[in-house]
Image: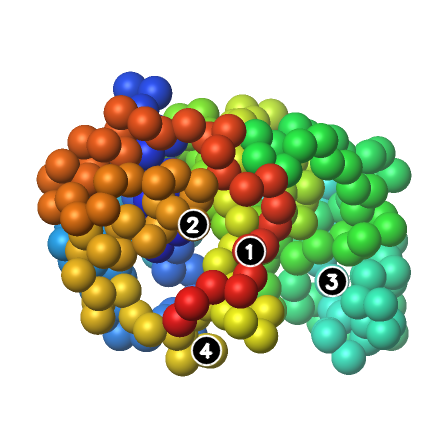
Amino acid sequence: MVAAVGSFLEAKSAGGNWLLRIEDLDPPREVAGSAARILHELQRLGMEPDGQVLYQSSRHAAYQAHVKRLLKKGLAYPCACTRKDLPPSGIYQGTCRNGISGGKKPRTIRFRVNDETCKFTDKIQGQLSDTLTRSTGDFIIRRADGLYAYQLAVVVDDDFQGITQVVRGADLLESTFRQLCLQKALGLSTPAYMHLPLALSTDGKKLGKREQADPVKHKDPAFAVAQALFFLGHQPQPGLALGPLWDWALAHWNSDRIPRCTAVAPVKV
């Protein structure tokens, strides 16, 4: 809800388009009907995407083509390792970087990182940097089950859709560095980034269905939007109906009011 309201207002207040993508990359974990429910709730709350909704499940051929490009350039390689082969740190040690040994069969495709420090300036979180050889190591871009990793898919689709700004939750901050490296390797455009603080429960956990958080569908639309606005540092007039509330939000939106942090707690739930 926070990410939807924040991204919608950031785009619309600048005269831009608000694009919606359904990242249905993992069919085994997908909950039937969830995408349709998301679209319905956004409409009920007064947020209509501009243009056709893009479903990542329809984009496998594009992902495959980009993986082949990386393999051909020597920037990716087959890997036989499993999670059990990783050290306690979780950082991949490059076991299969120079070829698979011991008669093992390839399982995944990994992207080859280097010692270069990735840097970017986030509109909310400020200047950030990371060296992937120290934080993740070579990371997976195609899984053992043949499905494509989130990091690769979003980079390919951001470029395909002409995305100029990504607005999302701060839980994806660390992912951004991997995406920057993939963008550079593939010669793709790099959007601006804006990572909103996460809404936490009183015990410091991210609000969501895992924590039995109250679903948005149980709330009055105007009340839900007003709650998100308050969370994002804006104080609309009390009692506004949904239409006038959006009018107020568009006229008063200012990203400088958003809390400069990665999470906010406690939040009443």
Asked if 72 appears above or below 140 in the picture, the reply is above
Q: Nearer the viewer, residue 151 or 167?
A: 167
Q: CA distance from mark 3 to mark 1?
A: 39 Å
Judged by depth in the image, the label closer to the viewer, 2 or 4, is 2
Residue behind mark 4: 210
Residue 49 falls left or right of residue 235: left
Tag 4: residue type? Arg
Residue behind mark 1: 264
Secondary structure beneath dot 4 equals helix
Residue behind mark 2: 231
Q: Residue drawn 38% across and 47% down?
A: 230
Tag 2: residue type? Phe
Asked if 59 appears above or below 34 in the picture, the reply is above
Tag 3: residue type? Cys
**Mark closest to the chain's N terminus, 4 or 3:** 3
Q: Nearer the viewer, residue 201 or 124?
A: 201
| Figure quadrant of the N terminus | bottom left
Secondary structure beneath dot 3 equals strand
**Mark closest to the chain's N terminus, 1 or 2:** 2
Q: Position of residue 148 (x, y in %)?
A: 52, 57
Residue behind mark 3: 79
**Mark closest to the chain's N terminus, 1 or 4:** 4
Mark 4 is surrounded, within 10 Å at the Cα level, by few (under 14), some (14 to 19) or many (20 or more) other residues, namely few
